[in-house]
Amino acid sequence: MDAAFTAEQDEIRRTLRELLAKHCGTDEVRAAAETAAGHDPALWALLAQRLGLPGLALPETYGGVGCGLTELALACEETGRALAPSPLLATAVLAAPLIARLGTGAQRAALLPRIADGSLTAALAAAPLARALGLTGADPAGAWAGGGRTGGVQACRAADGTWTLYGEVGQVLDGHSAGLLLVAAHAGGYPRSRTLLFLVRPEAAGLRRVRLTSLDVTRPLARLELRDVLAEPLGEDGGPEEAGGVLGALAATGCRAAAVLAAEAVGAAAHALERTVEHVRVREQFGRPIGSFQAVQHRLADLYVHVQAARSAAYYAAWDPAAGGLALAQCLEALRTVAGEAVQLHGGIGFTWEHEAHLYFKRATADELLLGPVHALRAHAARTAGLFRAAGAAT
């Protein structure tokens, strides 16, 4: 593994940081999060046109930049620093790889160029997200996609070959504003139950999208209600029936998404730490800056070690996505620790709406609720690595 970044990768980081510094201050982030879309469409268009961010990891054949996971992780590290509300995660990290892997030639040709140029956003409707992506446990039956009357989404195929979906999905990232929905659903009933992915247009009859009140306003979530909604299978008849088809694609996407999310969490943690260091240098108590007190210095040193260790894990996962789940656990824990200490070291002002410290604390908490918890991520990584022996296994 070569840990050094290329000149092009450094340029992506520098350019994006400068652009976000101009357009994603704390006031701009709050204003964008409160809009109907949950993000600033003008900024999204700028990111797409100037940097090609939505198509950064898509092949040039479909209008993408043709970069890899490392470049996408570096870009998301910068968006994490600014807590920039955007459809990047839902569109480029979750939906686009599934379309590229499972879609037919016609579907890829019709959808991926529009995703690459930023004119089409997409969302993956599969909840709980961590379970669907295989981050907290394997589920070969895909029970999270629906379970009869217990919830989820059921797919039914009519005699003329058309598919309809019925059910509900909660906590869908950018589900209220996405121009395309990828909905996971159960098909075949109990005798031949299988999980498939379907393309649903936002204007489809019977579809209702409700934006939810979320802890982290920069991560808009929605509930989808589907009542006999016409849908198009992703791939030939919804993809292969074996687990290595749709479920395998979701698991592979989960590993890559975990690596990107780990980098995003590191970016947020690093910026929260930087802002805290700036504060303790100027905030005075007992006639001297509080950063001069040894106890404060020790706490900041511990946070620095947390961030650096998490950054190493995130960069390794970008090189080897198989380590994505474990890296995500470490980075979410680092963000939670740094954000909590940032609030404390800012004193009373850190709890107020006017200060940005609480935004990072809410991002840390909401991410762990959506993608974790940390102990579940680590437990699944340990099981995958074979660290836990089955009961009665030979020693």
Image (cartoon, helix red, strand yellow):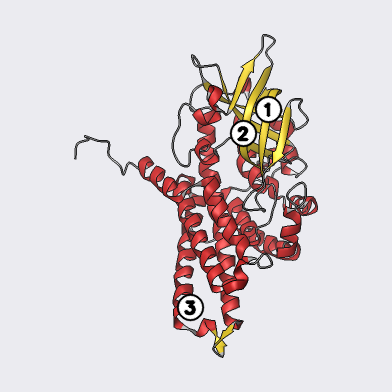
| Label 2 secondary element | strand
**Alpha carbons under labels 2 and 3: distance apart:** 45 Å
Q: Position of residue 247 (x, y in %)?
A: 51, 30
Name the side, left or right, on which 52 lies relative to 102: right
Do the CB atoms of the residues marked 1 and 2 lie less than 8 Å apart?
yes
**Alpha carbons under labels 1 and 2: distance apart:** 9 Å
Name which of mark 1 and mark 2 comes first in the sequence.
2
Q: Position of residue 140 (x, y in %)?
A: 45, 28
Q: Which residue is mark 2?
A: 169
| Label 1 secondary element | strand
**Alpha carbons under labels 3 and 1: distance apart:** 53 Å
Name which of mark 2 and mark 3 comes first in the sequence.
2
Q: Which residue is mark 3?
A: 296
Name the side, left or right, on which 45 lies relative to 368: right
Q: Which residue is mark 1?
A: 226
Query: Among all residues in the image, which is located at the extreme bottom?
Result: 287
Residue type at mark 3? Val
When the figure is inspected, residue 115 is found, relative to residue 284, above or below; the finding is: above
Query: Among all residues in the image, which is located at the extreme right?
Result: 42
Query: Among all residues in the image, which is located at the extreme top?
Result: 159
Q: Is residue 31 visible?
A: yes
Name which of mark 3 and mark 1 comes first in the sequence.
1
Camera-side residue of 15 and 188:
188
When the figure is inspected, residue 38 is found, relative to residue 336, above or below; the finding is: above
Among the 4 quarters of the image, the one containing residue 383: top left
